Amino acid sequence: MISTVPHFVFLIALLMLFIAMILVLLRLYKGPTLYDRVLSTNSFGTQTVLFIGVLGFLSGRPDFLDIALLYALINFVSTIAILKFFRYRAIGDILIKREAKK
Amino acid sequence: MIDTLTNTVLFVMLVLTALAIVRMERLFAVVMLSSVFSLLSALLFVTLDAVDVAFTEAAVGAGISTVLMLGTIALTKPIAKRSRHTAFVPLIVVCVTGAALVYGTLDMPAFGAYDAPAQMHVGPDYLARTPDDIDVPNVVTAILGSYRGYDTLGETAVVFTAGIGVLLLLSGLRRRREDEDEEV
């Protein structure tokens, strides 16, 4: 199935992915609010996963796809941590308890 | 051609991210940017076929250190203090070190050269012996898990001990704080 897709399709996908990465990075540099930055970090992680996939198909070795899945997991965990930080202004347990008391 | 393009684009994004990290004053944005920096360097490792190194970089740089930095920000202030020193001397030190490193790479064998010393020493031996000795399809797994088994065991013990130490320290701190709260 993979071999029926022509090579230049993956090349075009790679170029498009680079453009998308640069756009996301611009939003990350400028990003007026913190939420812009969180969103752009998260979508950059997604683009990392896509990049590893496209690079694997482009070099004819799609064995890296399972590694790309691991990147998706890391991205998920760090986004959860960042959002928890937003909600509670802390990472550990103790400060959450204090907030609950209030 | 594609490799050159990929490396160039990734390196340009890496340098831009590093410059943005230096210039940014809001530390929360710096944490986000350093997470992206680590993802970018992980991608560079992937293009070099070092997927295990890349994965370590992503897990430590984008995962754990982001969480640690956010925890630090929660305990301190979210805005960087302006430095009163000029950055001139550090800049010179960095430039000299970088030039020395680049000078050092000039003597290295070309990337992927088959007669590089790293490929000539014990690598072929491992490749030849692994199917008979260990019978694992992945040679890296065979080296880490069997040929260097004691080394890996020692590393795991060190990391395990460090984790237990950190957990003990943090839990002691937490209990003390709760006591203080009750007294207040």
Image: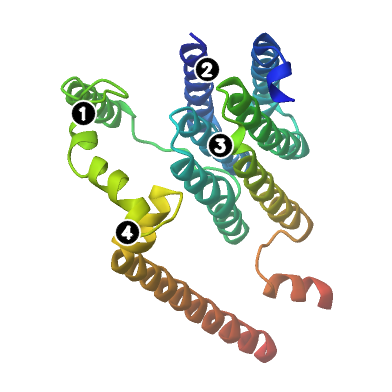
Nearest to N terminus: mark 2 or mark 3: 2
- Which mark sits nearer the N-terminus, 1 or 2? 2
Within-10-Å neighbours for mark 4: few <14, some 14–19, many 20+: few
Query: Residue at (68%, 24%) from the top-left corner?
Result: A30
The percent coordinates of residue B121 (x first, y second) are 17, 40
| Tags 4 and 3 on a common chain | yes
Asked whether the beta carbons under mark 1 and mark 4 sit within 8 Å of each other, the answer is: no
- Name the residue type under label 2: Thr
Which residue type does callout 3 highlight? Leu
Q: Name the front one of labels 1 and 2.
A: 1
Query: Secondary structure beneath disc 1?
Result: loop
In the rendered structure, find residue B116 and report the number of the disc placed on it.
1
Quadrant housing residue A81: bottom right
Q: Residue at x 68, y 53 (%)?
A: A77
Discs 1/4, front: 4
Measuring from the top left, give residue A53's x and y in whole percent: 65, 31
Q: Which residue in the structure is indicated by mark 2?
A: B6
| Residue appearing at x 68%, y 75% in the figure | A94
Q: Check the picture and name the quadrant holding the N terminus of chain A.
A: top right
Say yes or no: labels 1 and 2 on the same chain. Answer: yes
User: Image check: B94 left or right of A84?
Assistant: left
Q: Which of B60 and A31 is in front in this view?
A: B60
Quadrant for residue B68, please give it: bottom right
Q: Distance between the residues labelled 2 and 3?
A: 15 Å
Q: Is mark 3 on a helix, strand or loop?
A: helix
Residue of label 4: B133
